[in-house]
Amino acid sequence: MKLIFSLLLTLFVIQISFAQRKEQYPTTHVNEWRQMNTSKKTSFDWFKDAKYGMFIHWGLYSILGGAWNGKTMEEWNNGPKVAEWIMHAAKISRIEYAALASQFNPVKFNADSIARLAKDAGMKYIVITSKHCEGFALFDSKVSDFDVIDATPFKRDIIRELHDACKKQGIAFGVYYSHNNDWMDGSDAQSAESFKQNPKISEFEKTFCANTWDPSPNTFEEYLQNKAYPQVKELMQNYPDMKLLWYDAPLRMKPDQSFNFYKIVYDIQPQVLITERIGNGFGDYFIPGDNTIPEDPDHITKPWETVVTTNNSWGYKSYDNDWKTPKEVLYWLIEIVSKGGNYMLNIGPTGEGVVPAQSVYNLKEVGRWLKMNGEAIYGTQKWKVNREGPTGINMKSTEDRAKKGFQGNFTREDFWFTQKGNVLYAISIVKPAEKEVIKSFNSSIGKIKSVEIVGKGKVKYLQTKESLMVSIPKGFVPGIAYVVKVNL
């Protein structure tokens, strides 16, 4: 039953949240949206070069660690099993959930340490949840008291501190904002209205993402006018020079509502790139799905980004220790970048503000590799072939990754490719032998001027009609992976 639910959930979210359907664009807004979208060339260029970022899911749910009243997320049979959905899963009342704010005092939080971690990890940008579905804001909001300043003993503006820390470290900054789902103040996310318009929708469609157990008494439109639109304005006005705004899960949103969320941002910070999850076809870049690598990205017409968990939850889940190893993290990075996408990897701090130690170690290990080999990642584009070799790993959802785990049984025949002008890169995550063969670099690609092992220097090679044979230097120790650089 759980498997069926997970599959239905994945298919449903993909269908309603991620589709790029231009027929959804309202004709009254389409021309204005296109003008705004096309004005962002500098931001698009930056995004395509950056490749790798950090996602941070943090809120009151981090106090609970994925459990409520002695029952874990897996025991509550309602919605996704990720920890930030605990309010929805356990159907916690608004009054009970709001009381958690008095316990939120993350005195171990250090914005400078997190920004340095991102830099050490080789990440170029950070996006943090300014307000998730629970409705709690990590910034000083003047339109709601349900925020870190007014409702908690911590009384520090987390968004401000991280925004400033990123600026010091040269890390680009962005925020996640749950615009459609607000289980504290967002009524029922238009669920009843949607059901009235289409009584044939399933119970799953009617209740997914919505607070139907204890909805706030206001209308959804009142929520938009009095909280959501004003809070997005506050974010844009108070934290300048942002790069990204990550809206999420636009189920039931109307075209005018999505357009308004886009224009509010553009009017204040026109450079900010906005996710497709704003809804109704608006948005600047595409998200294939959570923990999802598209098998065939050629159909994606916009820049895209895959978001990935470090274990199997976005918010902190105290009992989930299924951490992605440095090898797996690097696999996701090179698989996504070789297909032309960006990779944003999540961390979920604890209720005290601590990043789990295993996350820190794994990210820094990949960062050490990127320090030497980053030229094969940053500023590259996909080549005519993204990879060769017999090993394929399909990841299609968070539930898919949790069920399968990671079987990284790669061979010496597995290579991933990127391109930068007249330079081609081949990346392997298997220890090389004395001679390695790259079939895709045969004579059909043109005459090769030189071949290098990145970080080691030029090496001997033989290019034929069938392949490129590369001589690996004696005593070469590649670490997690190594890169063959071909100059044409």
Image (spheres, grey):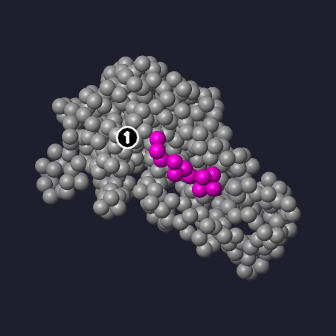
**Is 200 left or right of 166, judged from the image as shown?**
left
Question: Of 411 and 384, which appears nearest the observer?
Answer: 411
Give the labeled residue for mark 1.
Answer: 67
Residue placed farthest to the front in the image? 70
- Label 1 sits on a secondary structure element that is strand
Q: Amino acid at mark 1?
A: Ala
Query: Residue 268: in sight, yes or no?
Result: no
Query: Which quadrant is home to the N terminus?
Result: bottom left
Q: Position of residue 395 (x, y in %)?
A: 48, 61
Query: Can residue 166 be spotted in the picture?
Result: yes
Residue 264 occupies quadrant: top left
Q: Is residue 328 magenta?
A: yes
x 39%, y 32%: residue: 60
What secondary structure is the stretch in magenta mostly built from?
A: loop
Residue 356 in percent (x, y) is at 55, 39
Q: Nearer the viewer, residue 339 or 324?
A: 324
Residue at the image position 59 percent from the left and 49 percent from the top: 51
**In the shown orientation, is residue 304 left or right of residue 280?**
right
Pick the residue in front: 240 or 472: 472
Q: Which residues are magenta?
A: 318-330
- Residue 149 placed where, x, y %? 41, 20
In the image, residue 322 lies in the stretch drawn in magenta: yes
